[in-house]
Amino acid sequence: MAVVASAPGKVLMTGGYLVLERPNAGIVLSTNARFYAIVKPICEEIKPDSWAWVWTDVKLTSPQLSRQSNYKLSLKNLTLQTVSSSDSGNPFVEHAVQYAVAAAHAKFDKNKKDELHKLLLQGLDITIIGCNDFYSYRNQIEARGLPLAPESLAALPPFASITFNAENSNGECKPEVAKTGLGSSAAMTSAVVAALLHYFGAVNLSHLSTDSSDLDVVHMIAQSAHCIAQGKVGSGFDVSSAVYGSQRYVRFSPDVLSSAQVAVKGMPLDDVIVDILNGKWDHERTKFSLPPLMSLLLGEPGTGGSSTPSMVGAVKKWQKSDPQNARETWTKLSESNSTLERQFNLLSKLAEENWDVYKHTIDRCSPLKADKLYKQWIELGTDPREEAVVKALLGARDAMLGIRNLMRLMGQAAGVPIEPESQTQLLDATMAMEGVLLAGVPGAGGFDAIFAITLGDSNQNLVNAWSSHNVLALLVREDPRGVSLEAGDPRTAEITSNVSSVRIE
């Protein structure tokens, strides 16, 4: 019986750079772009002589890349070895497999260990596929002479193939399809860990609750595998949102993964996993989602992506060289981030307290330009309850303008294009459009896709306006769900419902 689990991509709306250090918070939105992991046995039955085996087979297939990698998994020390030196491998999935197997082994008593052993002797057949939204198909759309519109993206086959260019002068073989910056490696790692742990019976994802200890196990193992695979302990917001969904996030103390880092140098994986599962995970996550009648849109300007690690490195270098100005900038940026969060929470509260007033106000605001919103609103006449909604909208907009200004200043001081001039012009034009509350560059910034928050049913206006500015509106929307156990293979049938999904409560 195959197990299919999925995990979402993300958009870091606030907290770029700051989220790397406690106690700074980031607002991260999970999306409807999902990575899927399908786990099933290679053999339906155990061969009679297999009990004496010390190795079992693991097959990893990525249909979109037309790749298959074969491994041997040691049943003694739970580590993977590639069968062929020509296999390029996938370090994120490789670590996800090793850490998930070790976690199941650590959690089980002797009887369950025997059951796990039987499952492993049948081999592991793992397939990974990601929604098209994780990748940029802009070049292909333009090459076919199709309009830069979501309809062109929607016409692509689901889970479209990803081809690779020839090697460049540096010997690198880069994918023809670039990424859109939604955190594919974190979503992929989380999906693989979730599927494996459920397949082994180490967790039960069928009936999740937001305080589920099973979900915490998925998070700890996915976070550890992802950090070790990428060679550094990052903030972890991308894995946290992949597991738990949209949230306000404060990172964990990096020390919790010290034993995992030692494992790379030879510490037994069993001991590492026990330390990880019993460690002090002090990250903070709080329910967050966009207020009602607001939508997240992403637009791809076609200026190419950015290298997040190199930009982070430049900002850290600036912090060390000019600590006083860096602290002042970060303090102001943290305050602006908090202000935006408060205004969004206030809008959600106002919607809950009086839905009719809130909806009426948003409906009246959505055709207006936000920079002239208050003046036009006063001319239209209002009552105090409607005015409270308008003031909160304007408070959110002003906070984002402050965030953008501070991010630009930080980029200039660090010598990196956090909000480069081309993005500034695009964002200014976007924020001047009818029905757009705010816009910005997500995460570390740079030349990746921009985001916008729109009011009411004004999405199509922005999509059309972006197209006229040579910007491709993506199909991505906010979806507050985290890890989900799916009803079946998404390639063979449309998934009409999830067996289980999680949302921060």
Image (cartoon, rainbow, N blue to C red):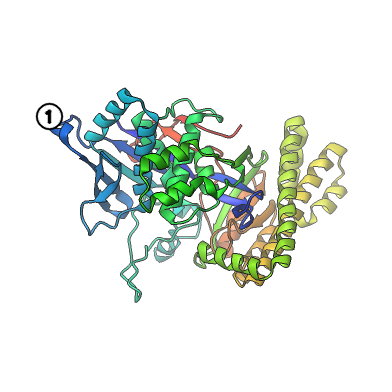
Residue at image coords 46%, 51%: 227
- Outermost residue toward the bottom in this view: 169
* Residue 259 horizontal/vertical position (percent): 45, 47
Q: Nearer the viewer, residue 307 or 21?
A: 21
* Residue 203 horizontal/vertical position (percent): 42, 29
Q: Could you tell whether 146 is left or right of 119 in the image?
A: right
Label 1: state its secondary structure: loop
Q: Nearer the viewer, residue 300 or 405?
A: 405
Q: Is residue 4 above or below residue 149?
A: above
Residue at image coords 64%, 40%: 288
Q: Nearer the viewer, residue 298 or 67?
A: 67
* Residue 447 horizontal/vertical position (percent): 55, 65
- Outermost residue toward the left in this view: 49
Q: Could you tell whether 329 is left or right of 114 in the image?
A: right
Q: Quadrant of the C terminus?
A: top right
Residue at image coords 66%, 40%: 293
Q: Say whether residue 306 is visible.
A: no
Neighbourhood count class around disc 1 (C-alpha, 10 Å): few under 14, some 14–19, many 20 upward: few
Q: Say whether residue 85 is visible.
A: yes
* Residue 426 horizontal/vertical position (percent): 63, 64
Residue where numbered disc 1 is placed: 48
